[in-house]
Image (tube, rainbow, N blue to C red):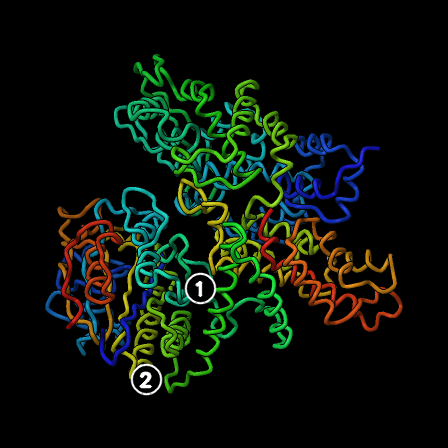
Amino acid sequence: MARTDRALIAHLMRRAAFGATASEIDTLSDKKYEDLVEGLLHPERAPAFEEDVLRRYYLELNNADSHVPWQSYWIYRMVNTPRPMEEKIALFWHHIFATSIGKSEHTPSSRQQIDTFRRTGLSNLRTIYLELARDPAMLFWLDNCENHRGEPNENWGRELLELFSMGVGNYTEQDIKMASRAFTGWTFTQPLPLDPYGRFSSEFQYLDTDHDRGEKTFLGRSGSFDGEDIIDIIVGQPATHRFIARHMYNFFVADEPQVPAWGIVPPQDPGAIDALAAELRKSGGDVRATLRLLFNSDFFKAAIGRKVKSPVELVVGTVKLAGSHRFPEPGLSELATAVSVMGQALMTPPTVEGWHTGKEWIDAGTLNERVNFAVNQFSNPDQPGVQAFVRSLKKSGGAVSPDRFVDRCLEWLGPFPISADTRRGLVERVRQDGDVRADAEDQRGQVEARGARLVQAIVSSIEYQLA
Amino acid sequence: MSANGKLPTLVVVQLNGGNDFMNTVVPYGDGHYYDSRKTIGVPEDRVLRIDSRVGINPHAAPLKELYDRGLVAIIQGIGYPDSSRSHFRSMDIWHTCEPDTVATEGWLGKVVRAIDPDKSNPLTAVSIGRGLPRALSAREVPVTSVADLDSYGLMSGFTAEEQRADALDLFQRIYTPAIGRGAVVDYLARTGINIVRGAEMLKQAPRMYSSSVEYADNPLAKALRDVARIHLAGLGTRILYAQHGGYDTHANEAPTHPKLLTDLSRAIADFYRDLEEHDAADNVLVLVFTEFGRRVHDNGSGTDHGAGGGAFLIGNRVRGGLYSEYPSLEPGSLDNGDLRHTYDFRGLYTSLLEQWLRVEAPPIVGGTFEQLPVVAE
């Protein structure tokens, strides 16, 4: 039976999913690495996320006017879904096609957009861009509903090229004008009147009479293009393949500089970007095929610890380890608050450019929140996560040396690499209280209390901020 | 240098949601006001008059008292060209001074960089509340955000003081050796150590504080009490930031807005009284701003997003009075039903930077803008 290295599985699960518990890694380590990747990339093979129970206990979801319950819903779903890649890929596209409810002020359409990313996120670029161009939240966010024949609004046309597909320097102002004209008449239906019906989602609508049928020249080609033609041209551009490849690298592999710098700062691993871009071209923009290449690559396997966890990754990963929020208990909205105060309010990115990632997630305020959140998740030694650790420790029984106690805990929490300095600090602290008795000698749950305290120290470490 | 040798300090109060300026400083002398505000107009006989044209909403009486003492400057019609009606976008523009492109560095973050280039004090700027407003964020600029001054800092979840101290001690033990270990790790380590240092300094604030002022019971008053405690502790803090939410009065403005103004004006008056009691008001200047004003015509229940609005400066060193022009309410001079701004907010920032904080303004606000003589020599 092929056995895969636990550290590598943990790495794959942090990146392609939201982390895994020690017992999940135990189960997965019997499989071949490539098969694990394949399983993650086919979320449809796993059962769908069941939301019946959540909806029954979390009545706030019936309030269509606020997106906060839906932020919590999404995080809860990331924690509990049997299809983590479905959520991870939705988050990936949400990072790039950053749409904020701050402008739409219309919860159902923002929610619907995330659902679209879940449904189409692993398909191909053509489908993804086409769905995006028809998405009511996006149509409103970038004013394409104000893009009329004879009176073009260029907001969507510009961002489609600049931030969503090719990046600056690969098209002209003229191309933006032409693309914008091609999308005239792409709008959405007005939902039922707010008063008295409340908020309902709207749908894509094509208004033929508002569409500019004139001749257009876009990226060197001419025709009476409409939006679909523009997308066909975009998905064939090498610039698009490189742009999306670099996004994949930044999101799944290692932190890159922020998007506006991409025209100036070359990628840290040009070979990786070349390989991903080539796969996108060869496969006709197939996202699943490209991610298969990515996760199986040596550059991915070597990238352990090369990313700062996003707030969502930190919160979901920690909750999974702690074993909390496995059921819609009261206080679910703490999840939405937690990621918001760490700088990643879901469905509310700061700008159309999306969140700045990597090191820029961290400032004194956000690091304070990150550390306190993670520590508080383990404040109760009865937490299922701590109990699981203690059980595994008790299995071996007897006295456990401080070194071994720390290593077992690190193994259980990850495994993830930790510096010699950090490890020394932890061991010294444990040593102050002597060996740990993981057997009948254990009086009054000392092992639980010490285990919880050690876990709290580890999740407050610098290394824990990294993925 | 301001009075009693203390460095000038700026307190920013951000009103979230778009405060209705027309119902705060009411143009009661203009018939168009009552034509447009049929549901929520403030009756003429209740307005606290400033002159024959405008007056202050009666629910903001404490603010009017400060105004009458010459301590309040009202900047009428403040805004910027092509005002965005989106909350987030407009707030962003106020935060970054970038109306055309989306920027990530905030004006106050740049001020902190100018005041403390060596990052010697993690408390040069303190924001009250969780998360950092973009106004205060700038690359590598340490800014402290405090949700609750009494429990601020790392490991705040530990209820037993001894355990918390133990956890903090271990935290420092594992963060300190990481300084200098690669760009990202070094940055994380320094940030972590700064939080500990900042919290250590801030701990003194509640201990040192005593006051006879009982603050009003509202969230802004609570935040401003924290601002006062930090200011009075003399920790070298130059910029303090507090927020007050709920100003997005599309509906039910008649009961909601007066309550907001009551809370706002009481909180500010209490804060001011507290500073006076401690003889610490001379080096503090308060700026109150919001992302936009609201539509001239009410919608039968409230008001929708508008453009030109108003800002306030409060303090001993403020040259009190009305500044700029109240925008015209003539239907013909409106901008899509909204007040046209008569003064650019970047001019007000410039005035504060040059006249109060003594920081060169153009690189921070992105150009040269007309100043107002709001600070008394």
Q: Is residue A180 left or right of residue B357?
A: right
Marking on residue B278: 2
Residue drawn at (42%, 60%), measured in percent from left and top? B142
Crowding at mark 1 (Cα within 10 Å: few <14, some 14-19, many 20+): many
Classify residue A151 by image quadrant.
top left
Do we see residue B300 in this rendering?
A: no
In terms of secondary structure, where does tag 2 sit?
Answer: loop
Tell me the distance, in whole angstroms, between the alpha carbons under discs 1 and 2: 24 Å
Classify B51 as above or below A58. Answer: below
Classify A129 as above or below A190. Answer: above
Dot 1: chain letter: B
Dot 2: chain letter: B
Measured as percent of width and height from the top left, residue B18 is found at 32, 56
Q: Is residue A428 left or right of residue B44?
A: right
Classify A242 as above or below A409. Answer: above
Residue holding disc 1 = B145
Q: Nearer the viewer, residue B169 or A390?
A: B169
In terms of secondary structure, where does tag 1 sit?
Answer: strand
Residue at the extreme bottom: B212
Q: Amino acid at mark 1?
A: Ser
Q: Amino acid at mark 2?
A: His
Residue drawn at (54%, 35%), measured in percent from left and top? A249
Measured as percent of width and height from the top left, residue A260 is found at 39, 38
Crowding at mark 2 (Cα within 10 Å: few <14, some 14-19, many 20+): some
Residue at the extreme left: B52
Q: Where the N terminus of chain B falls, by quadrant?
A: bottom left
Which one is earlier in the sequence, the residue at label 1 or at label 2? 1
Q: How many marks?
A: 2
Q: Where the C terminus of chain B falls, by quadrant?
A: bottom left
Measured as percent of width and height from the top left, residue B231 is found at 36, 75
Do we see residue A279 in this rendering?
A: yes
Same subunit, tags 1 and 2: yes
